[in-house]
Each structure stands twice: as structure tokens, then as C-alpha cells.
Image (tube, helix red, strand yellow):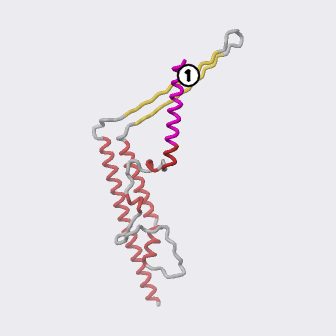
Amino acid sequence: MSDKKTGTAFVKTLVGVFALTITQSVMAFDLATPFTDPLQTLPTIIESGAVLPGDREPIPCPVSKDFGSPLVLTEAVDLALCNNPQIKGVWATIKVQANALGEARAAYLPTLSGTVNELQTKTTYSDSRAANTTTRGQTIYGTLAWRIFDFGGRAANRESANNLLAAAMANHDAVLQKILAAVIQTYFDAQTAKATLE
């Protein structure tokens, strides 16, 4: 009986220490931070933003413009790059491919799963003097699986995800250059038309 009390006290103490540690950790720093990108698959362009050649800072989106004053070329470029649906589409593709790379890297990690079942059975004898019975039981299952050999399947998936992410980033650069060239051409066409009109 005293062994059972000692074991229960030990478990309570262990749970208390664990709860205190978790509470202190939550108060010390944000627990979500390590889980934002644990496999480090997001490229730096996602956090820093796209930087045009010759610029030091990323494109300042959203851009505010008072259209009561004349539109200068830099404002036209910023407005176009911040509001173009093609650029938003390729930006989303970069994020999707970074997530796919994370899935490919996660295939190297072990998998832990657990199941807890609780069962209660109650037997009642209405026409008998036999005592009613109640039985309670718990089952706990845990599984840890770690794939060691897969004959190159995970490596091929990871390499494919890396290449698709690189392609998405190159496509983003190409779309940026295409939109930038179109905006500059359109801006100077508008300036030429205005000068011709005047």
C-alpha cells in the first residue's frame, strides 16, 4: 500500500515539475517560433521580400499614392509590382513549393503515434439478486517508426522538391522582369503621348 502511495506521489511530483517547466518556457519565449519553419525550407526571399536589381530594400507593399500629383516612374513600378496578379500567383507558388520541400525533408524523420482507449462495462441483473458489476479498463498503445532504407525514394523526392522550388523562384524573377519592362515601356509611351498631345 505504501508503494502505491509513493508511486502516486512521484507521478504527481513529476507532472508538477513538467507543468512548471512548460509554464516557464511559455513565459520566457514564444513556443510557436521553433515550429514556424522547423525544417528551414522557406527561402530568404519569403521573409525579406523581393528586391529589385539596384535596390537595397524590398518593394514596399502596399504602396499608397495620392493621384492628385503626377505619377513618377518609381511609383508606377511599385504600384504595378504590388498589385499584379501574376506576381502574386508566382509568389504563392514559391510558398507551395517550399511546403512541398518541407514534406520531402520530413520523410527522413521518425513517426510517433499513440492511442488511448477507455472502456467501461456495466452489467445489471434486474430479475436476480446477483450484484451489479461495473468494469473499467484502459489500454494505451504507442508506436515509433523510423524508415532507415528506402532505396533512394526520399532522396529523389527531396531533390525534385528542391528543383521545383528553384524553378518557382526563377519563374518569380522572370515574371518580375517581364512586368517591370512592361511598366517602364507603358510609362514612357504615356509620357510620349502626353508630350505629343501638348
Quadrant location of the N terminus? top right
Amino acid type at circle 1 is: Gly
Residue drawn at x 49%, y 41% is 21
- Name the foreground residue: 1 vs 198: 1
Considering every residue shown, the one lying at the far top of the view is 129
Q: Is residue 174 left or right of residue 14?
A: left
Where is residue 88, by image quadrant?
bottom left
Question: Which residue is disc 1 drawn over?
Answer: 137
The magenta stretch is 1-22
**Residue 164 appears at what percent x and percent y?**
34, 53
User: Is 80 contained in the magenta span?
Assistant: no
Q: Residue 137 is drawn in which quadrant?
A: top right
Task: Pick out the residue farthest to the bottom.
Answer: 198
- SS class, disc 1: strand
Give the residue displayed 38% in from the left and 37% down from the top: 110
Does the magenta-highlighted stretch encompass residue 11? yes
